[in-house]
Image (cartoon, grey):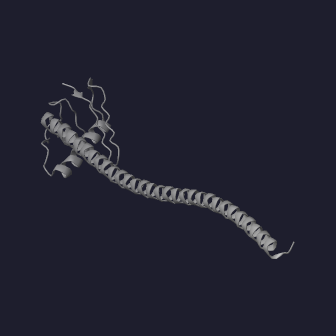
Amino acid sequence: MDAIADEITVRGGDSITATRRSARPMKPTAKLQENLQATEKTDATRNRRPHRLNEGGNGCENGLTKRAGEPQMTAEGAMGNNASLMQLMLRAMKKMLERLWDTLMENKRTATQMMSEQLEMIRQLQQEMIRQLQQEMIRQLQQEMIRQLQQEIQTIKAQAAEELKKTDEQCTRQLEIMREQTSPF
């Protein structure tokens, strides 16, 4: 039975790269054997559990031939290898999602802070506008009062001028009357 070539590549960091080759049977090559062994060693150190290796024979029982002196993975080991690769991918995806969540929460905190600062600025602008409107209303009231006072002053001046004129006329008449009385004919 020939091996099925599945290659899953996992890279750390902010991105995960997963590559899967076709599921058709392939003849094992030296490079495939090296990749399988390297993956097995990596998984063994990560999971801290040994994989079952087939140490004996010249190796066609699981579909994989082995090079002289190199161990061959059993079908069970390959499945465990795929499972641990999936676990590794899931862990990497979980870390990526956690980073995304943290970034989202930080963005939310930043947006909330910015909105509260903007609300404070708007409140201050409203207070300033209210103060300016109050000052404008006071100015308008003062101008209206000044206009009314000027009208009253004009009215009082006109009345005073009339009274002066009347008083002047009365004084002039009385003087004439006094002259007539004091003068002999």
Task: Locate residue 82, reporting x and y percent.
Answer: 20, 37
Side of 151 relative to 87 (left or right) = right
User: What residue is shown at x 59% (from left), y 61% (from top)?
Assistant: 149
Side of 126 relative to 179 (left or right) = left
Numbered disc total: 0
Q: Quadrant of the N terminus?
A: top left
**Please, which residue is most extreme toward the front here?**
185
The answer to which quarter of the image holds residue 154 is: bottom right
The answer to which quarter of the image holds residue 77 is: top left
Q: Quadrant of the C terminus?
A: bottom right
Side of 29 relative to 133 (left or right) = left
Q: In the image, is residue 20 above or below residue 109?
A: above
Q: Nearer the viewer, residue 124 or 175?
A: 175
Q: In the image, is residue 1 above or below residue 15?
A: above
Task: Locate residue 137, reporting x and y percent.
Answer: 51, 56
> Is residue 174 visible to us here?
yes
User: What residue is shown at x 35% (from left), y 50% (from top)?
Assistant: 107
Q: Nearer the viewer, residue 128 or 47?
A: 128
User: What residue is shown at x 31% (from left), y 46% (from top)?
Assistant: 100
User: What residue is shown at x 40% (from left), y 57% (from top)?
Assistant: 120
Q: In the image, is residue 20 above or below residue 95?
A: above
Q: Nearer the viewer, residue 146 or 112?
A: 146
